[in-house]
């Protein structure tokens, strides 16, 4: 999987990224094996309800979450039921209809935050999901695309959470999620 290969590239960071199915993260005990969980595969929207309650408890107790593009689609009004547990821990409104752009100019608003440090404005040539409801109150918008939140961070409970509007998983022929570059 291209995304796993990029995450496991020791050139930049030293950690082990693994791919798991919903049944491997549907309890707080299972989630304790991880430092951060990444969600955003639109193909898994029917499985989100199985791990959402445990994920919320884990994040609010100090876990880390990165929600990428297609999270609003997978957890929101486009694929009922709306998952309040996901909305509580993702720093954008996931209860609404999703929308997306194909490509856009990314305006980096905060260059000192660790999530955007070293970045300057750039063009992103891929699908970009955004919440039609915008960022949550109190969340910090670090970058926008066409004025809509693209990178957003927050601290639900004792945890930390980020939304990255970039779509990393993309359904291709054969149905396997892969990194779109």
Image (spheres, grey):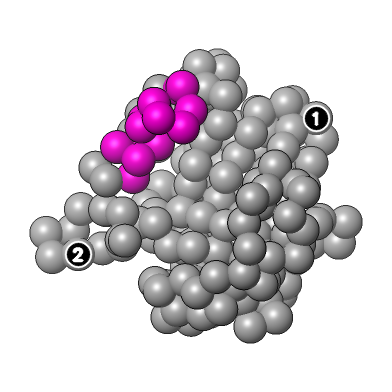
Q: How many marks?
A: 2
Q: Position of residue 76 (x, y in %)?
A: 57, 65
- Image quadrant in which you'd find residue 7: top left
**Horizontal placement of 168 versus 110: left or right?**
left
Image: 77 above or below 47: below
Residue position marked by numbered label 1 in the rendering? 158
Q: In the depicted view, which residue is nearer to us: 25 or 121?
A: 121
Task: Tell me the number on the disc at residue 172.
Answer: 2
**96 relative to 99 in the view: left or right:** right
Q: Residue furthest left?
A: 174
Q: Which residues are magenta?
A: 3-15
Q: In this view of the protein, which residue sits in the foreground, 54 or 167?
A: 167
Across and down, in percent, residue 153 comes to 73, 51
Q: Residue at x 75, y 65 (%)?
A: 109
Left or right of 133 on screen, residue 98? left
Residue 69 to residue 124: above or below: above
Give me the residue at 36% from left, 32% from top.
9
Q: Secondary structure at mark 2?
A: loop
The quadrant in which the N terminus is found is top left
Please tell me how crowded label 1 is: few (under 14), some (14-19), or many (20+) other residues with Cα within 10 Å: few
Residue 10 lies in the magenta-colored region: yes
Q: Is residue 150 above or below residue 56?
A: below
Q: Element at badge 1?
A: loop
The Cα–Cα distance between marks 1 and 2, rounded to whole angstroms, is 37 Å
Label 2, residues with CA under 10 Å away: few <14, some 14-19, many ≥20: few
């Amino acid at each position: 999987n291209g995304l796993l290969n990029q995450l496991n590239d020791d050139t930049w960071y030293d950690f082990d990224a693994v791919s798991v199915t919903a049944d491997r993260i549907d309890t707080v005990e299972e989630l304790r094996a991880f430092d951060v969980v990444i969600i955003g595969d639109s193909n898994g929207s029917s499985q989100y309800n199985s791990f959402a309650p445990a994920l919320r408890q884990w994040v609010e107790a100090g876990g880390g979450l990165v929600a990428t593009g297609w999270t609003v689609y997978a957890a929101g009004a486009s694929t009922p039921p709306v998952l309040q547990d996901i909305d509580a821990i993702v720093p954008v409104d996931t209860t609404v209809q999703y929308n997306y752009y194909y490509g856009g100019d990314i305006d980096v608003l905060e260059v000192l935050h660790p999530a955007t440090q070293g970045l300057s404005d750039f063009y992103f040539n891929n699908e970009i999901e955004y919440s039609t409801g915008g960022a949550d109150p109190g969340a910090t918008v670090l970058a926008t695309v066409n004025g809509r939140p693209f990178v957003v961070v927050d601290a639900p409970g004792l945890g930390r959470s980020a939304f990255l509007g970039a779509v990393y998983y993309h359904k291709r022929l054969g149905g396997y999620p892969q990194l779109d570059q």
